[in-house]
Image: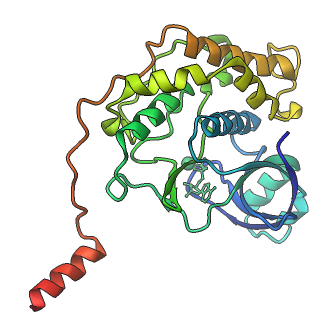
Amino acid sequence: MLEQITATRYVTPLREGGSLPGVVEADDLGTYVVKFRGAGQGRRVLVAEIICAELARSLGFATPELKIIDIDPQLGAREPDEEIQDLLTASAGHNLAIDFLPGALGFDPLGWRPDPGFASRLLWFDALIHNVDRSWRNPNLLVWHGDVWLIDHGAALWFHHNWRSANPRRDFDGSDHVLAPYATEMDAADADLAPRITRDLLDKVTALIPDEWLEDEPGFDGAQAVRDGYVEHLLARVHGPRDWVPSPAAAPPPERERQGSIGRFWRAAREEGR
Ligand SMILES: Nc1ncnc2c1ncn2[C@@H]1O[C@H](COP(=O)(O)OP(=O)(O)O)[C@@H](O)[C@H]1O
Ligand SMILES: [Mg+2]
């Protein structure tokens, strides 16, 4: 089970994405990014967040800790924005809390040159979970304490919006992936990661999803049947023919110097003054 906490203060919305996650404080004195059950695509997004983050963690990627947070809609009583009030009302009860990484920076391949092994493993992982939300425009990676942290897996596992057309062998288009140009070692990534996606791991990860986010899924007989649906899909994807594994990049792009950074500006000014 994921740890359970209770929200004590709604701090501010994060307006970047469409789903309006918010920064929230909780009774364990922690600060969290909360993904609300009542937002846009509802509880399936939270299910994808749990499965993918916990799989990522077990494969050795850094990703913030997850907890289940209880929300009282009264928290938003003083929030002037009606959209946020409505969101909190629609989300009364259990939601997903993601540990807030204070001072984390958005990932920029010009500032932090990815290692080819890491890039290949991340591209492989995103292909496994059908994650189309790691583009160079919107990498959903944070740099924090010298490491790259994976966030925002709400758009992954999108087959669950239409289970009948779910296809474990579906191709993955990695052409837009932020690290695709650096992913030169796909065979090694596949050999390393594929054997680690076992039934035992998938059972453990799906067991963390609260029953109430799985119940009444059309076509399934109860929460455990939905868990099994995810397990069988991912097992078939990883242990069947792996045509979905993206081809490796031929060679990483040449290292480029950042243009117009503050450091460059000062260096130029100093050199001129000499
Ligand atoms: N755990 C976190 N710590 C710090 N900042 C975060 C965290 N999670 C998300 N953010 C910030 O909030 C933004 C939106 O969160 P994200 O999970 O990407 O949701 P969305 O579905 O709205 O894109 C991110 O781009 C990032 O800047
Ligand atoms: Mg995002």
Does residue 101 lie above or below 65 as drawn?
below
Q: Position of residue 251 (x, y in %)?
A: 23, 34
User: How is the model colour-coded?
Assistant: rainbow
Q: State left or right for residue 30 relative to residue 152.
A: right
On the rendered image, what quadrant is the N terminus found in?
A: top right
Q: Is residue 67 visible?
A: yes
Along the line of sight, which residue is nearer the eye, 40 or 164?
A: 164
**Residue 31: quadrant of the picture:** bottom right
Q: Which quarter of the rendered image does ligand 1 occupy?
A: bottom right
User: Toward the viewer: 189 or 180?
Assistant: 189
Count of residue discs: 0
Asked whether 207 or 91 is in front, the reply is: 207
Furthest residue in direction bottom, as rendered: 273
194 vs 47, left or right, is left
- Identify which residue, 246 or 239, lies in the foreground: 239
Q: Position of residue 11 (x, y in %)?
A: 73, 69
Q: Residue at x 24, y 29 (%)?
A: 250
**Residue under the point 61% across and 67% down:** 102
Q: Is residue 13 above or below residue 190?
A: below
* Residue 159 appears left or right of 262: right
Q: Residue at coordinates 62% horizontally, 27% vertically from top-left?
A: 157
Residue 187, position in %: x, y? 39, 22
Res 167 visible: no
User: Residue 15 appears at what percent x and percent y?
Assistant: 59, 59
Which residue is painted at 23% across and 43% down in the image?
A: 253
Q: Quadrant of the C terminus?
A: bottom left
